[in-house]
Amino acid sequence: MENRVRATQLSYVSWDHPELPIPLVSALAFLAEVAAREDLPDLGCKVVTPDSVAELGVLGRAAMEGPTVRAGLMRVCKTYPTFSTHERIVLQKTPRGGRLLVSYDIPVQQDALHLSQQYTAALVQLFCLGAGAHDPVFEHLEIPAHPRCGIDHLRPWFGDRMTAARGRVLVMHLSDAVLDLRVQLPAGMSPNTPEDIRQPLSDAGGMEPMIRHLIGTMLSEGVPTARDLALASGLSLRSLQRSLSMAGTSFSAILDAARRDLALERVATGHGSFEELSVELGYADTACLSRAVRRWTGKTPGQLRQAARLDRGD
């Protein structure tokens, strides 16, 4: 499993931070790789457990705050842009209910698309069942087919009210009877607070801040290259360089800024020795790190760490 995570450029991701934004392309590639190796075309359904909605954190709470299935799904649609820049979720009204549409605005391999969309459908089904809906939950389900297996392997999960989507959009048709079911937060689960809801990732100030954040997380596994970033972004190296140039920046400039942010944070918080930090950020030795910190702040790493300790009252 560790090799598969590394092969799809996700080895830097901390399992302790499940809401950390990660490259969608890499996540979908990992899902498709595991499903193919294990011969599990229904892997997206198999990984869903009775606790899966609650384990979604902010998104799960957004759904379960209700007071109805309809209101919960509408709140998820509103909240979702804080977690994804390239996946769209929309709830549309229909004469006898509604339809929930899920799509990507980037190219996605058909097997990965099928797996991710069945996972989404399984989560929505679980949410509705938890509110008291009966099988089959969906009036009709249109799901992109697996390139080799089609959709028949999903019938044990979703029943026979299912067809292969003509396009690449997952469409879940829900009746008013299901949408009007009451839901409530489980005992012990608190509703989201305004602090829980981040601004939409696409509104985070353009391309540069998002890439700087991504590079910052990738630094835990070593210094990434422009090619690493292009792969994680689903772009060719040339397209990435052109996009950064149009945004008035470059990979090296963003990398330097990300290294600076992480270095100053680690120095101030006392996280690790200066030797360890030098290795993590790709500096030849602690002297190189010290010169960089002095260039940024006018102080040595030791002076910064001591000042931070005094501020904290350590």
Image (spheres, rainbow, N blue to C red):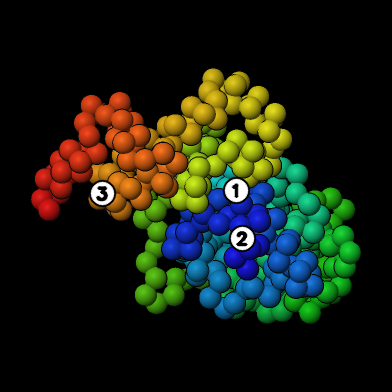
Q: In 3D space, how far apart are the residues under numbered discs 1 and 3 (Cα atoms)?
A: 27 Å
- Label 2 near label 1: C-beta < 8 Å? no
Residue, x 84% and y 50% (percent of image)? 167
Whether 292 is drawn above or below 167: the answer is above
131 vs 307, left or right, is right
Q: Secondary structure at mark 2?
A: helix
Q: Position of residue 31 (x, y in %)?
A: 69, 62
Looking at the image, tell me whether mark 1 or mark 2 is earlier in sequence order: 2
Whether 208 is drawn above or below 72: the answer is above
Q: Secondary structure at mark 1?
A: loop
Q: Quadrant of residue 261?
A: top left
- Label 2 near label 3: C-beta < 8 Å? no
- Disc 2: CA contacts within 10 A as few (<14), some (14-19) or many (>=20): some
Nearer to us: label 1 or label 3:
3
Residue, x 49% and y 47% (percent of image)? 222
Mark 3: which amino acid? Thr
Return the mark for residue 5: 2
User: Which residue is denoted by mark 3 in the rendering?
Assistant: 269
Nearer to us: label 1 or label 2:
2
Q: Secondary structure at mark 3?
A: helix
User: Which residue is denoted by mark 1 in the rendering?
Assistant: 23
269 vs 184, left or right, is left
Position of the N terminus by quadrant: bottom right
Mark 2: which amino acid? Val
Q: Position of residue 269 (x, y in %)?
A: 26, 49
Q: In 3D space, how far apart are the residues under numbered discs 1 and 2 (Cα atoms)?
A: 13 Å
Mark 1: which amino acid? Pro
- Disc 1: CA contacts within 10 A as few (<14), some (14-19) or many (>=20): some
Q: In 3D space, how far apart are the residues under numbered discs 3 and 2 (Cα atoms)?
A: 29 Å
